[in-house]
Image (cartoon, grey):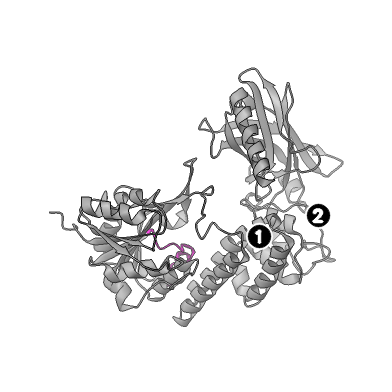
């Protein structure tokens, strides 16, 4: 028998998720002998989930089913019941719509045992479905194995707010009374994670992928974190961050407390600012007032620790009593950040956000390396029967680009969800000085027929004569007819439906549907949506 056999309880929580819960439980059972039990906590489901869990328990005695008789409204209460029921020395958590990759539990357990740490953590990947595209979560923490003797020595640990990519010693959680907030409490991970860090455990970090977080944006019922249509989601995020900050401060962990605020600015504030133009005026007004009140408690050091985009978005909100400059804030909050014109300066020559808000100073733009500057490139895709052109315009930024001497731009079309052909399509165009605008322009033909069906992001790499470069995306120009859907003749496909569009962050992307069948399918779905709305 392996010395690490039967050492871990995996707590799987779910509510009305019959479509996925079996895969989640089986992924935990497939971890092998290291798993003593899989505690499946059903939060009063009505869709047949309990019966599926009972069938799994009949197949494998390691499955223990806990049925709640009243729905808790959140994730914290069922996880707490899992902690209470756990009989193994270690425990970890799994949501019903996610999976554990092979070997994940053993890799975490080996690290925890080898270093005698109460906590071990590994890499989580976000997998977009149905495309399968994966994005690592906080990869900077998990580049190589590491032993952190105390969380305060690595404040960036506060950036990883997930609880599911970690293994915890069960008696450590119980001895310190570390639990999740009860009931409906979105972003319960923030508070739980702060309580873990506040207890000051040594933590073993491993570079292996230990959790696959499935992101289903087209699901009929969005997960709590994805359902951001209501202002309540934003207030919940601020409250969770507020509690996490207070927990760490009360524990004397000032650096970790500041890091909790930093991750709010860098992640939460930027993400919601990108989505503001999508909401109605009532939502935007509420969001601005609530955010302004919350940020008023941040001090200069809190803001200084954040990334430039997060810091500037916060400064603009604090400087104005009403919502303003939403589309420009959206561009700045993008990843990578884009600062669109105008580019005014104060009387002393210091760059400022706008003539109306000169107190939001952008002096850092005069000193940051070119590769980190929030450069702005406008883009327009002009599909034509014979040739499709991509036109780009690079804006000057307080003289910084002139000094670096822009020479060319590498353009990549990167497949996203639904793309039929994997891989990247590349082209290069020369940048030429535009005497009228004071910037630079470039133009390159695009062979749309070679891309294939699906959604394609446009990514740019600006090259400068001084040897530097800047990776960015292009701001999609809007206006009458610019982002219009077109059906084009195609030698390869017969016909090709082309739809340029602006993403939530304002970047240019395009959808392609080749062939008569592809075009008719898209138009049929469009007609169905229009009839449904009517």
Nearest the eye: 518 or 347: 518
521 is higher (above) or lower (below) than 142:
above
Distance from label 2 to label 1 (Cα)?
19 Å
Seen in the image, is 170 located left or right of residue 453?
Answer: left
Residues in magenta? 152-165
Percent from the top left, x then y, of residue 141? 44, 58
Kind of element beneath mark 1: helix
**How crowded is the residue under tag 1: few (<14 C-alpha within 10 Å), some, or many (20+)?**
many
The image shows a total of numbered marks equal to 2
Kind of element beneath mark 2: loop
The furthest residue to the top: 491
The furthest residue to the left: 1
Percent from the top left, x then y, of residue 232? 59, 67
Residue 61 covered by magenta stretch: no
134 is higher (above) or lower (below) than 432:
below
Which residue is labeled 1 in the image?
A: 273
Percent from the top left, x then y, of residue 235? 59, 70
Which residue is labeled 2 in the image?
A: 342
């Amino acid at each position: 028998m392996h010395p690490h056999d039967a050492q871990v309880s995996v707590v799987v929580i779910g509510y009305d998720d019959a479509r996925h819960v079996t895969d989640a439980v089986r992924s935990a059972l497939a971890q092998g002998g290291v798993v003593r039990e899989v505690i499946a906590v059903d939060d009063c489901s009505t869709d047949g989930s309990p019966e599926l869990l009972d069938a799994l328990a009949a197949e494998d005695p390691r499955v223990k089913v806990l049925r709640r008789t009243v729905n808790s409204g959140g994730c914290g209460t069922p996880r707490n019941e899992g902690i209470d029921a756990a009989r193994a020395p270690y425990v970890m958590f799994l949501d019903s719509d996610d999976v554990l990759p092979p070997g994940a539990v053993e890799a975490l357990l080996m690290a925890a045992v080898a270093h005698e740490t109460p906590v071990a953590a590994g890499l989580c990947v976000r997998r977009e479905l149905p495309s399968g595209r994966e994005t690592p979560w906080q990869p900077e923490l998990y580049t190589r194995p590491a032993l952190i003797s105390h969380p305060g020595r690595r404040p960036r640990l506060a950036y990883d707010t997930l609880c599911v990519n970690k293994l915890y010693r069960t008696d450590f959680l119980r001895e310190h009374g570390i639990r999740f907030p009860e009931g409906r409490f979105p972003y319960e991970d923030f508070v739980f994670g702060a309580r873990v860090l506040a207890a000051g455990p040594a933590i073993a970090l491993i570079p292996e992928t230990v959790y696959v977080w499935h992101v289903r944006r087209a699901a009929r019922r969005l997960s709590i974190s994805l359902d951001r249509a209501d202002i309540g989601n934003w207030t919940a995020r601020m409250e969770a961050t507020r509690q996490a900050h207070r927990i760490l401060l009360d524990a004397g962990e000032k650096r970790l407390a500041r890091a909790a605020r930093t991750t709010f600015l860098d992640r939460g504030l930027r993400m919601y600012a990108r989505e503001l133009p999508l909401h109605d005026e009532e939502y935007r007004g509420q969001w601005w007032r609530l955010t302004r009140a919350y940020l008023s408690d941040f001090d200069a050091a809190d803001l200084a620790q954040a990334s430039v985009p997060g810091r500037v978005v916060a400064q603009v909100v604090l400087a104005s009593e009403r919502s303003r400059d939403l589309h420009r804030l959206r561009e700045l909050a993008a990843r990578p950040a884009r600062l669109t014109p105008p580019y005014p300066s104060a009387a002393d020559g210091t760059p400022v956000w706008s003539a109306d808000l000169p107190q939001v100073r952008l002096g850092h733009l005069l000193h940051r390396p070119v590769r980190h500057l929030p450069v702005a490139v406008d883009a327009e895709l002009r599909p034509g029967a014979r040739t499709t052109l991509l036109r780009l315009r690079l804006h000057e930024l307080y003289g910084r680009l002139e000094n670096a001497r822009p020479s060319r731009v590498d353009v990549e079309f990167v497949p996203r969800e639904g793309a039929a052909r994997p891989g990247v399509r590349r082209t290069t165009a020369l940048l030429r000085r535009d005497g009228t605008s004071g910037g630079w322009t470039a133009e390159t033909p695009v062979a749309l027929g070679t891309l294939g069906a699906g959604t394609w992001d446009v990514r740019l790499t600006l090259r400068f004569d001084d040897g530097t470069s800047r990776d960015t995306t292009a701001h999609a120009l809007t206006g009458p007819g610019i982002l219009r859907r077109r059906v084009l003749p195609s030698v390869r496909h017969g016909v090709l439906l082309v739809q340029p569009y602006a993403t939530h962050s304002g970047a240019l992307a395009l959808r392609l549907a080749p062939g008569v069948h592809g075009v008719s399918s898209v138009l049929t779905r469009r007609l169905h949506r229009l009839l449904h709305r009517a």
